[in-house]
Amino acid sequence: NMFFVGNATAANWNNNNNNQAIFRDASNANKFHFIGKFGAGEFKFLEILGNWQPQWGLKAGLVANSDGGEPEPFTVSTAGYYTFEVDILAKTYSITPYSGAMTTYSSIDIAGNLNGWSGSTVLTQSSFDPHQWFIKDLVVSSNGEAKFRANGSWGLSWGSDTEFSGIGKIG
């Protein structure tokens, strides 16, 4: 339930513009992480899309929320791919350059009970970061399973062995 906002992000300073989610650590609800592209500039993160409060940034160099006043933004001096980690309880964060392997796919789709496993529900690739994909207003009319797949083929697909966690596993 945390989303980026700021001119270092794809959403810019719009608080309801398909803002990129920050992933919550499965074993510690106070920790969040993200690997992806940042532009040179500033960013904060929000708890609720479309609302400016509560928001998170920095106060005196420590991670802080908007209780007691608006926090300062995090800054990125050089555009590129980074790992961002934050612990809102410990009030710590890190932004480090990412140099791991990255694959760019020509398409990503979702297939499952929602569309008869046809894979015809194609996600939109971010123009800001070609490694980020999204879908808006997906209507799911029945319970069941779903997987994501790359390039219209089952040769590379992602799913999860638990209920939706926001993180898929190659399978």
Image: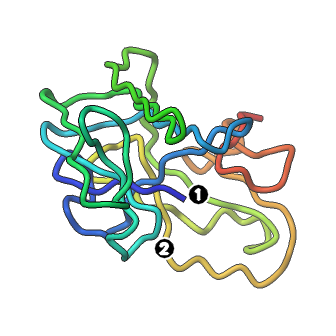
What x and y, as percent, mark residue 143? 86, 74
**Residue lying at 37% horizontally and 61% vertically, measured from the top left:** 67
Is 16 on the left-hand or right-hand side of 163? Answer: left
Amino acid of disc 1: Asp
Return the residue found at the far top. 99
Residue that mark 2 sits on: 136
Provide residue 159's location: percent of width, then percent of height.
75, 46
Viewer-nearest residue: 92 or 83: 92
Reading the image, the residue beneath label 1 is 109
The quarter of the picture where residue 65 lies is bottom left
Task: Please name the residue shown 72% across and 66% down the image.
Answer: 118
Question: Which residue sits at x=24%, y=35%?
Answer: 60
Q: Amino acid at mark 2?
A: Lys
- Residue at 58% x, 57% y is 109
Q: Quadrant of the N terminus?
A: bottom right
| Element carrying mark 1 | strand
Looking at the image, is mark 2 or mark 1 nearer the viewer? 2
Residue 92 screen position, x and y as percent: 43, 30
Could you say whether the residue bearing mark 2 is in a helix, strand or loop?
A: loop
